[in-house]
Image: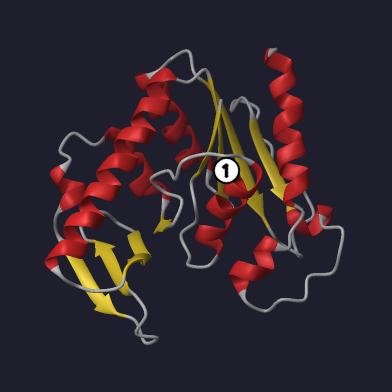
Amino acid sequence: MKIISLSHSEAGSACSVGTFIKRFYNQKTNFFDYLVVDMKTINNIINIKDLNLINNNYEYEEQESGKNITIKFNNFSKLISYHDIKNNNNESIIEFKNKYMRRYHRLMSYLYEEDIIFFIRYGKTSYFEIKEFINNIKNINKNLIIYFINVDYDENYLNNIYYSDIENYIYINFNAINKKKIINDDIYFRILEYNWEFVFNLINDNLTLYK
């Protein structure tokens, strides 16, 4: 069993999912943990045939803080690193490429070898993107049990999201389950205050179905 972050398409909320998975489970870092990424790119990565698309055609931008370099993967619609390198030099870029090759191969080995994977993505995700994602994985490992957990915070959305033909899709609105008032204004630290215990208790409850 593995729990894998599918991140989010916006900075701050993207890294929060991977951060909380590591707090609850002793897992190695996965490909999308600390990248800003859209679902189109996730599906492209899973189906990728030419790994040079991951290793080439970057755009570099120094951040205003001066602490890190932003790296945009220009071969994909949205795939951005904000935290991986501090200096734009050859040694740092080679290390960056090697790191993401390791993480890519780790991700693919999980897809091929695991029996059950819980994927967690922040923010509402469209039906068609989820269907495409699941179909892509089933083409790799038809026996893999897939959970797609869509976590979100929306004060104006009171309904559950349910797709009758997507098995093991779960939508969780933190606005409905948070136990305390959230006071942090920074989106990353704000999301870390959410009731993640509920999410991981739900995962553990579902795991008992397969024991």
Q: Is residue 144 above or below residue 107?
A: above
Q: Residue at x 74, y 59 (%)?
A: 194
Residue 89 appearing in the image: yes
Give x and y (percent) for residue 56. Answer: 14, 55
Q: Can you say which quadrant of the picture contains the C terminus?
A: top right
Q: Residue at x 17, y 47 (%)?
A: 53
Q: Residue at x 77, y 27 (%)?
A: 205
Task: Please tell me in which quadrant of the rendered image residue 118 appears.
Answer: top right
Give x and y (percent) for residue 51. Answer: 17, 40
Q: Residue at x 61, y 24 (%)?
A: 167
User: Crowdedness of circle 1 by 10 Å Cα count: few (<14), some, many (20+)?
Assistant: many
Q: How many marks?
A: 1
Give x and y (percent) for residue 88. Answer: 20, 73
Residue 163 appearing in the image: no
**Residue occupied by mark 1:** 120
Q: Is residue 126 above or below residue 153?
A: above
Secondary structure beneath dot 1 equals strand
Q: Is residue 66 left or right of residue 162?
A: left
Q: Can you say which quadrant of the picture contains the N terminus?
A: top right
Q: Is residue 110 above or below residue 12?
A: above
Q: Amino acid at mark 1?
A: Ile
Give x and y (percent) for residue 174. Answer: 75, 55
Q: Is residue 64 left or right of residue 88?
A: right
